[in-house]
Amino acid sequence: MSHVMYNKIWAEAQESLNSLLQKEIEEKSQKPLKDRLVVFQMLATFYIKYVQIFRNLEAAYDQIVHPQKRLIIRQVLDGVMGHILELKNEMVELEYSEYHYFDDILQDLKLSPKKHAKVMLLEEAIRAIQIAERARQGRLRATFMKQIYLEEKRERLARLHGTRGPDLETAAVNIQRFWRGHSQWKRTLQLREEEMIFLGMSPPLHFQRPSASLLRAQKIDSLRCEIQEKHESDFQKALVTIKEQVREIEGPDIKESLQDQIRQWFIECRHVTGKFPDYPDEEQGGSASLFSDKTPEQRGFGLPGAAFYFWVAAELIAKEEEEQKRKGRRKGKKEKAEKGKKKKKGKEAEGKKPRKKEEEEEEGWKMAPSNFLSVMEDGNNKYKDIWQNRDEGWNFPQEYDPELIKEEKRKEVEEEIRIQVDELMRQELKNLKLAVDRETEKKGKKGKRGKKKKKGKKGGRKKKPKKEKDLTPDRTIDSLYQELVEERILIKAMKVKLGDYIGEYSYLGTTLRQVNIEPMPSLTDVKQLIALYGILPLGSQSVHEKAPTVKALLLAGPEGVGKKMLVHALCTETGANLFNLSAANIAGKYPGKAGLQMMLHMVFKVAKQLQPSVIWIGDTEKTFYKKVPKAEKEMEPKRLKKQLPKMLKTLKTEDRVLIVGTTKRPFNAELKPLCRVYKKIVLVPRPDYASRFVLWKHFILQNGGRLFKQLNISCLAQVSDGYTQGHILKAVQAVLTERRLMQLNKKPLAAVEFLTCLAKQNPVYKEEEEMFKAWYAKTPLGKARIKSMTEKEDTGKGKGKGKGKDKGKEKEKKKEGKKGKKKKKK
């Protein structure tokens, strides 16, 4: 597709983003919501729509080569990514669950959870049908013309040979000769290929060779990346050269205009007040504070003397009014505080407790303030002002626009020159005061100000954070990196993408929750959490600094569900360094307390310096063992137990470092210290039926097999209930050997062949799955989820019980009334 198409995708994404931002502003202005279901529906719809915008912006950023467009797209893209994480955090706090199900909302929005083909317009569909029909007619015409040509050729040959045709015996011999030669040629080619495969000179037949279309697509991607890099380098060079040109050509004029403007301000202020004004300090912004956020007319540019005089007078009056308002506010606050103290004292004397803030505030839910709405609004405004209606017919190669660079650099040059002008004009103002008003600097005032500042410093009891001691001040990062590689603590991540983690979407999550059944999460849900908590924050610095922080992540699940694969995919997608601090890996390395401190210092120093970084702790339950087994005492598995929380505190918001723990036996660990380190816990389940169906297909095709009619995939998915991805992969690899692959043409695959390999492996039984559920229910988030569910049930039952009690009381009152009437009659 051309750059016009991706510009169109970008424009559509910006339009939908603009409408969403307006909706969010409207929602914030409304009253707090009380119904949790309505709140979740609102958050979920926002979340889904922002994900759609994110995908479109990602495609546009990947394909567009214009450097200035890519800057704005990246700004908006970071804002959208960060806001998606904020919405996810709001949903987790609302539902007390890491997993959410949007099948009903997707159905309402007429969306599918998977990627689907783009809907064609009517004109495009008609055009495609016309092309296909013309091609079909052309093929028919060609076959018809070929038949005519062959008939004419036969007639010509008949005329040459006479009325008699060719001899039947000679014709049969010719056909046999050609057929035997062709069949022998095919056999020879096959024998030659088999010999070359046997000698190892050529790859096997089932080896996946890239197609011509795939090679062409890869070539286009590489060319696009080269063009993007070239345009980016040219743009960076132009930023420097154009700024120098603006400084040389326009710098003197800017300097003169600033000086004239400030001098005029001096004179008119003296006419209004009778004395020269005080020049603003550097902390206040210098002369920029006088004319900031004002149009040229408001700044007094181009005005005659009388008009500028009135402008200065209005500015001075406005400043005086602001100072008076500030003083009035301070007095009002003091009076309110005193009244509040008196009321509290009076209530305490009467024995009444003061009201809490929670009781005064309106009950209900309101969205927390966002750190990314301003970023998205800024990027959206830039798009509207610059690119929305811009004609780029002249810019076919999509290179940078020098006029836009001049506008930006002119402001920077003006700020730099303004600093120099402020220094000159301060000195000029002093000279004017000495010459005209005969004023001198009063040192006493400065001394008093200095004393006030010192008192303020003494009053503050805030302690400065202690700096970390550098245990390796004389060593370079390269030497530390080399040592960690030699000790096999810094390892190479496998090249695995997150898309290789195969799974299916959960289509019945909402319906199960409506019936008060907590569904097991699907593999696609796990993949989404890894992308949200790992890939997005580590991939963008601005998102990591402003989004809800996730310093440590725990992946808990049975053996073979792909926990290690997810860790390696996380490193591959973000380009992160992988550090292995598993108990088995660090056993015997850096012994003693000093050695452990040195190892952790080196790991975190290199990780912070070479961001992004992932610190992986495999079998992390061993670090928090309840009781260390005798066989593992020599390994000292609990070495990191006390040090991990301390090292987590050293991680700042700007450090793109993530600690990822994996465990297959979390119930063997102490829960409290484990949850103190890992605030985010992701439960990785065994695959359900839909995921197993997809996995069997994928693994068979990946290992060179073919799908035949005799191979019942549905039967395999049903029989393999309880088995994980690792079990299925082992069964497929055991069956599809080289010899079996060569027999596929004569003997198709059958489902029975895989069952014997599955039977030799131990599945995940229901008891183990229940143990994982019970353990997760004891975590802080699991407890909160159970508590919210029980509160809902209690409220539902309480309504029914209250009605029953009221009816019972009414019956008792009626009976007592009847008895009283009978006594009176007697």
Image (tube, helix red, strand yellow):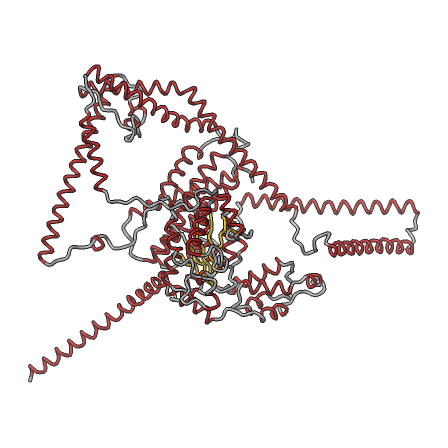
- Looking at the image, can residue 532 be seen? no
Confirm whether residue 356 shows in the render: yes
At horizontal 48% and vertical 68% (from top left) the residue drawn is 631
Estimate the x, y position of residue 706 in percent, counting from the top left. 65, 60
Quarter of the rendering containing residue 800? bottom left
Which percent across, then down, holds residue 350?
9, 57
Front residue of 352/70: it is 352
User: Quick one: 5 or 353, which is closer to the camera?
Assistant: 353
Is 225 situated left or right of 278 in this image?
Answer: right
User: With respect to residue 585, does 300 lie above or below?
Assistant: above
Q: Is residue 654 left or right of residue 765?
A: left
Q: Position of residue 362 (x, y in %)?
A: 23, 53
Asked which quadrant contains residue 222, the reply is: top right
Q: Which of 748 and 415 lies nearest the eye of the viewer?
A: 415
Q: Quadrant of residue 175?
A: bottom right
Total marks in image? 0
- What quarter of the picture does the N terminus occupy? top right
Against 771, residue 528 (above or below) is above
Residue at the top extreme, as displayed: 435
Q: Quadrant of the C terminus?
A: bottom left
User: Residue at the bottom extreme?
Assistant: 826
Nearer to us in this view, 623 or 341: 623
Q: Position of residue 550 (x, y in %)?
A: 40, 52
Q: Is residue 276 left or right of residue 478?
A: left
